[in-house]
Amino acid sequence: MKTLKVHLPWLFAGLVLLALAGCGKSESGAAGMAPADSTARQLTLGVAFETLQTEYWVAGYEAIKAEAASRGFKVVEAVADNDANRQFEQVRSFITRKVDGIILVPKDASTCLPMIKAANAAGIPIVLFNRPAAKSDAKSVAVVADNFALTRSTVDYLVGQAKATGKKQQAMVLIGDLGDINAVGRRDGFDAAVKAAGDTLEVVARVPTEWNQEKAQAGVVNALQAHPDISFIFTSSDFLLPGIVSALKGAGKYHKVGEPGHVILGGFDGDATAWQMLNDGYLDATGVQDVYFEARQSVQAIVDLRAGKALPEVILDPGFVIHQGNAKEKSAQMWGANVKRK
């Protein structure tokens, strides 16, 4: 009993110190942990898309959600159905819910600026997926295809096919909604390739589409009637290909690569229709946006911004050109080929 009386106070003090040390460690882990550390708690991302009208947007939407899930993040979803005001309210709802980051596909480069500024004011990092904002003091990061360079490379390939015929080609280009900076980059990439082509091409029809399939098809029909010798077509988005095919069939001009009367045909995006047309032998080439790269980079950018890392304003997806010569080799990287396999 004497031994117990001598050591009991020291034993009690030691236990108290251990308990305090344990409490101190727990409090430090909760209060002292950097907010960007996803091991502290599950992060929540607000993902707001302007539309799911095309296969590309659906593929991007699913890829972002899959990437977030692979990291254990929760996703709150919103689709604005082409309504910028509705999208602003959706973003404000994300902010009210105190999400940890926002990934946004805006309607255009300007309407997103108030959304970005609202996120900035709330201290929430915001990343724009595949559609960058106009220049301003609003702070965001955009992950986007290199529209100019990828279009230029795609049309350069098509020009090479045109040169191989030994004949000057009459060309048509379908232009997207010029309120979308992506459409501007693709138009400019086409024009740069045509300028470099010299006498190989004469652009006789420039069809405005505003990213509308009906308007695009009507424009192609009219152009083929006005210029029946058109033998080269480039579309700024593959989602317009069905209307082009319909118009070519109506004009008796839909033939496979290598067949007499084939119209050299190329596009941009890499969707399932383009993949099927490549397989069937009707499409010469398309510029493929790497959806998987863009999704990974978008989610990683949120993580990096929360960690206080400096990022460039624009992260470019170089993409790649898929054509009749490399279709088998590149199919695994083409998101439209994977969509088709489902």
Image (cartoon, rainbow, N blue to C red):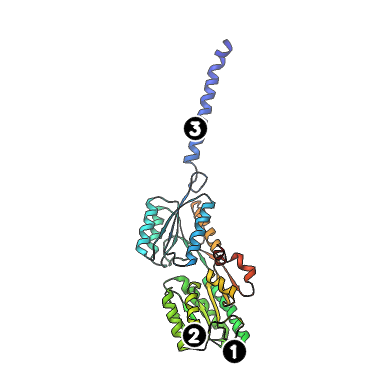
The residue mark sitting in front, 1 or 2, is: 2
The amino acid on which the numbered mark 1 sits, given as a three-letter code, is Lys
Residue 268 point in image, percent of width and height: 52, 73
The answer to which of marks 3 and 2 sits earlier in the sequence is 3
| SS of the residue under disc 3 | helix
Residue corresponding to mark 1: 167
Residue at 48%, 83% (x, y): give it. 250
Q: Is residue 53 visible?
A: yes
Horizontal and vertical percent position of residue 101: 45, 54
- Helix, strand or loop at mark 1: loop
Residue type highlighted by circle 2: Ala
- Which quadrant does the N terminus fall into? top right
Residue 149 seen by the camera: no
Q: Residue furthest top?
A: 2
- Residue at screen point 58% across, 81% down: 159
Residue at numbered disc 2: 251
Q: CA distance from mark 3 to mark 2?
A: 79 Å
In-front residue for pair 272/8: 272
N-terminal of the pair, mark 1 or mark 2, is 1
Which of the pair 293/2 is nearer the observer?
Answer: 293
Mark nearer the viewer, 1 or 3: 1
Q: What residue sits right under mark 3 in the picture?
A: 23
**Could you tell me which residue is drawn at 51 percent across and 65 percent down?**
144
Asked if 65 appears above or below 204 in the picture, the reply is: above
Label 2 Cα neighbours within 10 Å, binned few <14 / some 14-19 / many ≥20? few
